[in-house]
Structures are given as structure tokens and as C-alpha cells.
Image (tube, helix red, strand yellow):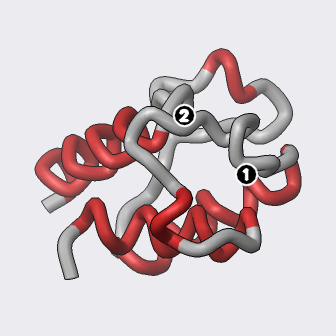
């Protein structure tokens, strides 16, 4: 399973959606993921990919990890995997 497919599966699970409903251009807000769902998604991503995501749940806008769209989350994970390997 590719990084893209894994991320979409994680996000779809949090949003209680079918993975087919999650597009690369979807925002977490579009998918109905609230702040708690975001934190749970980050934890799931960290566990799935064995990475540490630089994300502050108290101030998500100040994070170096772009969560604006599904595509930006995937790109961020791929960057972290390269940096942390």
C-alpha cells in the first residue's frame, strides 16, 4: 500500500467516510475532522509511518507540518520519512 493510500485510509477512518470520498484536494475541515480527530490522525500517521510529526495541537497554524489538504499531508510525511531515515 502506498503512502497516499495509507494516509487516505487513516483520514477516511477518522472522518467515518469511505476512502473513495477522500481526495487529494480535500481539507480536513471539508471531511468533517475536528481538532480531536486531527490529533488522532496525527498519532495514527506517526504510528503507521514510524515518524515524529512536528505538530502542536494547541497551535496548529505555527506547525512546520502543512495540514491544509490531504496532498500536503502526504508530501509532509514523505519529507519527514526522508529526513528521519
Q: Is residue 56 left or right of residue 49?
A: right
- The x and y percentages for residue 28 are 66, 41
Q: Is residue 19 left or right of residue 83?
A: right
Q: Is residue 50 above or below residue 32?
A: below
Q: First in sequence: mark 1 or mark 2?
A: 1
Q: Quadrant of residue 7?
A: bottom left
Between marks 1 and 2, how big is the CA–CA gap? Answer: 9 Å
How busy is the neighbourhood of tag 2: few (under 14 within 10 Å), some, or many (20 plus)? many
How busy is the neighbourhood of tag 1: few (under 14 within 10 Å), some, or many (20 plus)? some
Q: Quadrant of residue 59?
A: top right
Query: How many numbered marks, from 0 up?
Result: 2
In front of the other: 9 or 77: 9
Which residue is located at x 21 percent, y 56 percent?
81
Q: Is residue 32 above or below residue 25?
A: below
Which residue is located at x 60 percent, y 68 percent?
12
Q: Which residue is mark 2?
A: 67
Q: Could you say whether the residue bearing mark 2 is in a helix, strand or loop?
A: loop
Q: Could you say whether the residue bearing mark 1 is in a helix, strand or loop?
A: helix
Residue lying at the far top of the rendered structure:
62
Q: Which residue is mark 1?
A: 38
Q: Which quarter of the rendered picture does the N terminus lie within? A: bottom left
- The x and y percentages for residue 69 are 49, 33
User: Can residue 46 be seen by looking at this rendering?
Assistant: no
Pointer 1 with pointer 2, Cβ within 8 A: yes
In front of the other: 41 or 85: 41
User: Can residue 63 be seen by looking at this rendering?
Assistant: yes
Q: Is residue 38 above or below residue 2?
A: above
Which residue is located at x 32 percent, y 50 percent?
77
Q: Which quarter of the rendered picture does the C terminus lie within? A: bottom left
Amino acid at each position: 500500500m502506498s503512502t497516499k493510500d495509507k494516509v487516505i485510509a487513516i483520514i477516511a477512518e477518522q472522518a467515518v467516510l469511505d476512502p473513495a470520498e477522500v481526495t487529494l484536494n480535500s481539507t480536513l475541515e471539508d471531511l468533517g475532522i475536528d481538532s480531536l480527530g486531527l490529533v488522532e490522525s496525527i498519532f495514527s500517521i506517526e504510528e503507521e509511518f514510524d515518524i515524529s510529526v512536528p505538530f502542536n495541537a494547541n497551535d496548529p497554524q505555527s506547525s512546520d507540518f502543512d495540514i491544509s489538504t490531504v496532498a500536503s499531508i502526504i508530501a509532509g510525511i514523505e519529507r519527514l520519512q526522508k529526513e528521519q531515515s
